[in-house]
């Protein structure tokens, strides 16, 4: 695919010269563009897809973060209703638009969320890489657009591919930041007549509303990406204003367009903060680790300025061709070396995809499956023990959150407080479970369940331990570094057969209220 991109860049570089000579054929330019689109999308597909060819799980397998994402896709594959991935009757507390679209795509493909996740993740990143190429092609020369897009795509795949919603936003960020500077500069320096749709400058100015739409996409796809994009684009806007301060603004239209573009993300920000608690702000502020990919991507975004400066300097000394060839060779060698190292950078995530047991109870590395292979029998036991109803209407309490990632049941408690909706009051639910564990009889437990202010679980999927059942709860290591897990024991006497049905499946026991 790198060779395809190189051929496309060479062909597109020759097009302007041949246009001037009147010898270019229209099909050649279209063919070169097609090669570029196929090359950049194929690069993503091969780089991410080939290491995962023998597994149906995506990067990270069923690790906690991926469980959370797969669970969201599974919920929206089951129903288009805007809802939380765990709790019944609650909306998502995060930017979940990508997961909604992925879930609806899974429903159209008639695939469960966990299986569709890999296909949709790779496809969405590949499509976005192509869109990024199209955007850059409107900003810089065609061959330079291919180079910038390829570099930013490689960086995104290496550092952000595990989170496809964030990767989609980051792929478009360099073009958006550069467009802010260019569009604002054009809006400031042009007059009223130059802003007419027939003006050559109009396309640059017309990008301003699209930039607002991009920020809105970040706000609805991934709040952390929005936390990157908003300040960077604001900085580019201010830079354009400062560097063009000597120009007189002959029209208020650029200011109005810029204000509209800024209002869309501002409204999204206010909406998120009004729906969430103050702690939700920490989800928007990028962490130190997350800045790595943005730094790399922004270095690629700076390539137009670097190329322009280098070309200007080389023209003055008459060595333009030699410098351009040397730079091209260095960039190509560095890019090939980086691309070859991407599988090593993703090795841990790929390993999880092969060693974790998928929703059909199989491990891609052909080793014996974990307890996950009992999940299908657990699902059948729940269907037998409960009245016919959609899975989303059944509340399950379990210490194995991957079960809820594979089957779209509602949950009483997520895998940890890190993934809990603030509106669900995680701590009060834990206290309720502790209170249930202290009851002496099944009748007292049923009475306590009925008094619960939240909708109580009607099904318990627990692991057996001695004379009772154990529920293991995880802690968010960023909040509580002293302990990783807490266990709550529930005695077997609490689940008397008069009130609960009992089905033992492997290490699990399915307890459903009668």
Image (spheres, rainbow, N blue to C red):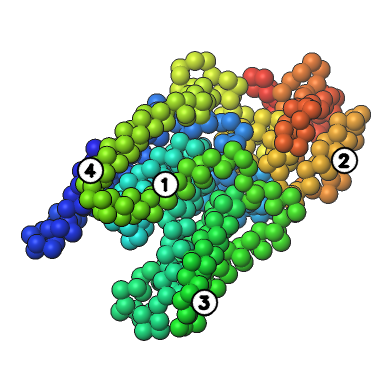
Q: SS for tag 4?
A: helix
Q: Residues within 10 Å of mark 4 (few under 14, many from 20)?
A: few
Assess whether mark 1 and mark 3 are in contact (beta carbons under 8 angstroms).
no
Q: Residues within 10 Å of mark 2 (few under 14, many from 20)?
A: some
Q: Residues within 10 Å of mark 1 (few under 14, many from 20)?
A: many
- Front residue of 459/184: it is 184
The answer for how far apart the CA atoms under marks 1 and 2 are is 59 Å
Is tag 1's residue or tag 2's residue first in the polypeptide sequence?
1
Which residue has dot 3 on it? 255
Does residue 204 appear in this view?
yes
Which residue has dot 2 on it? 448
Which residue has dot 1 on it? 300
The answer for how far apart the CA atoms under marks 3 and 4 are is 43 Å
In the picture, measured across the screen, residue 440 lies left or right of residue 482, that is right
Q: SS for tag 3?
A: helix
In the picture, measured across the screen, residue 416 lies left or right of residue 220, that is right
The answer for how far apart the CA atoms under marks 4 and 1 are is 22 Å
| Numbered mark located on residue 476 in the image | none
Assess whether mark 2 and mark 1 are in contact (beta carbons under 8 angstroms).
no
Q: Residue at x 50, y 72 (%)?
A: 245
Which residue has dot 4 on it? 322
Is tag 3's residue or tag 1's residue first in the polypeptide sequence?
3
Q: Residue at x 55, y 60 (%)?
A: 235
């Amino acid at each position: 695919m790198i060779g395809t991109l190189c051929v496309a860049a060479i062909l597109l570089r020759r097009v302007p010269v041949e246009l001037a000579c009147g010898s270019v054929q229209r099909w050649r330019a279209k063919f070169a563009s097609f090669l570029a689109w196929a090359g950049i999308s194929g690069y993503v597909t091969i780089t991410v897809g080939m290491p995962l060819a023998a597994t149906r799980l995506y990067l990270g397998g069923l690790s906690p973060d991926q469980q959370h994402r797969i669970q969201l896709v599974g919920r929206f594959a089951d129903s288009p209703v805007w809802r939380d991935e765990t709790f019944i009757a609650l909306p998502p507390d995060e930017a979940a638009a990508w997961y909604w679209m992925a879930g609806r795509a899974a429903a159209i493909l008639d695939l469960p969320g966990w299986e569709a996740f890999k296909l949709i993740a790779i496809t969405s990143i590949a499509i976005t890489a192509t869109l990024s190429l199209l955007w850059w092609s409107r900003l810089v020369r065609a061959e330079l657009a291919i180079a910038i897009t390829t570099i930013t795509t490689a960086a995104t795949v290496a550092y952000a591919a595990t989170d496809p919603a964030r990767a989609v936003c980051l792929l478009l960020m360099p073009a958006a930041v550069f467009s802010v500077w260019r569009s604002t500069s054009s809006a400031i320096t042009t007059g009223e007549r130059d802003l007419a749709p027939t003006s050559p400058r109009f396309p640059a100015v017309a990008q301003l509303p699209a930039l607002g739409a991009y920020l809105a996409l970040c706000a609805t796809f991934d709040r952390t990406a929005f936390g990157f994009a908003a300040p960077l684009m604001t900085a580019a806007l201010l830079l354009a204003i400062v560097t063009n301060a000597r120009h007189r603004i002959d029209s208020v239209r650029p200011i109005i367009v810029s204000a509209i573009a800024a209002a869309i993300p501002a409204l999204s920000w206010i909406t998120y903060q009004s729906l969430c608690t103050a702690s939700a702000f920490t989800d928007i502020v990028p962490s130190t680790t997350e800045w790595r990919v943005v730094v790399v991507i922004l270095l690629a975004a700076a390539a137009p300025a670097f190329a322009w400066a280098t070309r200007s300097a080389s023209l003055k000394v008459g060595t333009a061709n030699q410098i351009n060839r040397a730079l091209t060779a260095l960039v190509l060698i560095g890019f090939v070396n980086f691309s070859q190292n991407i599988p090593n950078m993703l090795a841990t995530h790929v390993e999880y995809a092969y060693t974790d047991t998928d929703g059909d109870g199989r491990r891609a590395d052909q080793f014996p499956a974990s307890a996950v292979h009992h999940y299908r029998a657990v699902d059948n036991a729940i269907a037998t023990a409960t009245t016919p109803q959609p899975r989303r209407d059944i509340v399950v309490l379990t210490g194995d959150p991957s079960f809820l990632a594979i089957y779209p049941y509602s949950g009483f408690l997520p895998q940890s407080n890190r993934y809990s909706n603030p509106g669900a009051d995680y701590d009060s639910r834990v206290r309720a479970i502790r209170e249930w564990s202290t009851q002496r009889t099944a009748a007292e437990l049923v009475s306590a369940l009925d008094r619960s202010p939240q909708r109580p679980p009607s099904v318990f999927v627990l692991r057996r331990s001695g004379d009772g059942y154990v529920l293991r709860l995880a802690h968010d290591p960023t909040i509580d570094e002293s302990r990783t897990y807490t266990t709550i024991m529930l005695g077997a006497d609490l689940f008397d057969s008069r009130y609960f049905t009992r089905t033992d499946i492997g290490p699990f026991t399915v307890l459903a209220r009668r």
